[in-house]
Image (spheres, helix red, strand yellow):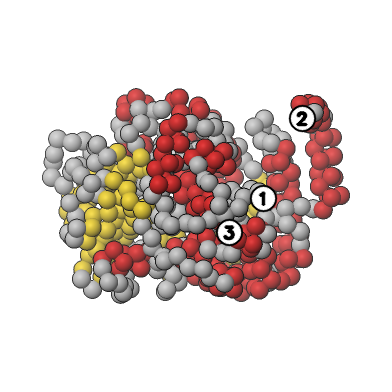
Amino acid sequence: MTIHSKLTPDVATPAITLDAWQYRLTAQPHPAARAVGAYWLTVGPGLPVIDVLSDQGSIGLLLGFPTDLQSKRRISGEWRAPSQAGSDMDERIHNLLRTLGGRYAFISTQKNRPRLYPDAVTGVSCVWDPLAKSAGSTAGAILSDTDYDARFDRALYRHLQIDGEGWFPAGLTAHKGVERLLPNHFLDLLTWTAHRFTAVPPAKPKPEDVIDGVIHTVQAQAKALLTGPKGLAIALTAGRDSRAVLACLKDMRDDLLTVTVTGTDTDTDTDTDTDTDRHQTDTAVAQQLAKGFGLRHRNLPRACATRAAQDRFVRRGEHCYADSNKEFHPSVGPIAKTHVFAGGLGGEVGRAFYWSEADDPGLQVTPGLLVTRFGLRRSDVIEARLQDWLDHLPPLNDARDIFDLAYVEHRFGPWAMAQFCTDPTLERYSPMVSYDAVRLLLDLPHDWKAQEKLNEAIVARMWPELNSYPYNTLGPWGDRWIQLQRVAADPKILLKKLRQRRGAL
C-alpha cells in the first residue's frame, strides 16, 4: 500500500470537521481527506502528520508528537526510519516502535499489515467503531453530534462516577459500540479488531540495568524536545518522579524551566484535604529546591476554568475523564505558547501501584479483585471485559506482575492518556516512557517496587544532593503548620474533620 497526498473527489459523504489534535481514519472516502493506503485520514488543527519512509519506500504515517531516541531529535514532516532487523514484518514494526519516544500513533500501510499502533501508553488516544469501520482520537471525532448523544451510556457513566475520579477501564468508553485501544495492543484495520503484541521481549534485568535504561530514556527525550522551536519546562514538586526526572537532566538544567502549580485549592468544594496539603507542600518544597540549586523556576498559580471551558474540556475527552484537570487546566496557560511540558508520569509503573502488603505470587487475580484495586464500583460489564483480558494475558506467574500490567493497560492509558485532546494548548510529555523504559519498569525486582527504591536510586546516581530535601512532606511540624493555617482560614475544615472522625468510630 502507498500513501497519496491527493484530495478525494466529490462524494456523497460530508466533509469532516474536527477539533484541535483530533483525527479520524475511515474505510470510506470523505471530501478533503488524505488517502492512506486503502483508508482516508482527516486531522484537526495542530496535529502533526509525518510520512514514514524506509529503504522500500513509504511504510506509514505517524500522528502526534514523536521523538527519535537514536538521533535525539523531534520528528516532523518526514521521517526515515532506521533500518530495522527482524525475521518478519511484525518484528520489524515492533523494533521500529522501540526507536521512538514522545506521544504518537503509527499507522502502518505495509502489505497485509494495515494497522494502527499506539506508543507504549497510548499517548495519542485511539477509539474505534467496528461497525462503521472508523477510528479516531475520541468518540467525538468519529460520531456525529446526534449519534454522540444517542449512544452516550449515561448509566455506566454515573456508575463509574466519571464526574468525580472515575474512568473507563477494559477498553470501554462512554459510548455504546465505541471501543478504546489499550496499551500493548494494535488495531487491525482489515478486521477492525484489537490484538495484543509485545514490542519488547520480557526480561529480568538487574536494578542497575533499569536505572541505566530509565536515565537514558529521560535524557534522550529531553534532548530531543530541546531541539524544537519551544523551550522545555519540567515539573518541580515534592514528589519522587519529578525529582528523578530533574536528576537525570542535571547537565541540562541551564536549558530548562522548572514550574510548579501553586495554590491552596480552598476556592473549590471538590478538592479533598489531601489535595490541599499536597499542593502547599509541592509549593514549599519546590521553592526550596529552586533556591538551593539555582534553578530557573516559575510558579503557576492555579486558575479555575469557566463552566463553558470545563464542559469543552470534558467533551473534547469524550466524557471519559472529569477530574480536577477539568477545573484547573488553564493554570498552564502562561507557558503554553513558549514551552512544551515534561512531567514525571510513568515512574509509578515501578512502584507497585495496585499491590497490597498481603499479596503473594500465587494470589488468584479475578475481575472483581481488579475492579476493587482500581477503586471503581463493581460492574458485570467491566468484569466480563476484564475476564477476557485475563484470559489473553501473556504468561505471568506472579499476581503482582498482573497488577502492574493492569495499571499500564487499564489506568495509565484509559485514564491519563485519554486526556490527549482535552486541552490542546500545551504539548505534554512523559520522558520516563518509551517501549523499552516501560518494559524495564515492569521487570524491576519486586522488592524494589515494594520499597519504592528506584527514583531515589536514580537521584543518588545522577544528583545525590537532591535526596537531602524531603519527599511529599515538610516534616511533622511543617505539615501540622499547613493544617493549622488552613483551619484558621476556614474553620469549617475542623468541623469536617470532626464529622469524619465520628463516622469512623
**Mark 3 burial class by Cα count in 10 Å: few <14, some 14-19, many 20+:** many
Three-letter residue code for mark 3? Gly
State the separation of the CA atoms marked 3 and 1: 16 Å
* Residue farthest toward the right in the current orientation of the protein: 477
- Image x and y of residue 385, in percent: 41, 39
Residue occupied by mark 2: 504
Q: Is residue 236 visible?
A: no
Nearest to N terminus: mark 1 or mark 2: 1
* Quadrant in the picture for the C terminus: top right
Q: Is residue 388 above or below residue 268?
A: below
Residue occupied by mark 1: 357
State the separation of the CA atoms marked 1 and 2: 23 Å
Q: Residue at x 17, y 51 (%)?
A: 38
**Mark 2 burial class by Cα count in 10 Å: few <14, some 14-19, many 20+:** few
The answer to whether the residues at label 2 and label 3 have Cβ atoms under 8 Å apart is no
State the separation of the CA atoms marked 2 and 3: 33 Å
Asked which secondary structure carries label 3, the reply is helix
Q: Residue at x 44, y 70 (%)?
A: 69
Query: Where is residue 449, by image quadrant?
Result: bottom right
Asked which secondary structure carries label 1, the reply is loop
Three-letter residue code for mark 2? Ala
Disc tally is 3
Residue occupied by mark 3: 350
Instruction: Classify residue 143 as left or right of residue 165.
Output: left
- Image x and y of residue 96, in percent: 34, 67
Query: Where is residue 469, by image quadrant?
Result: bottom right
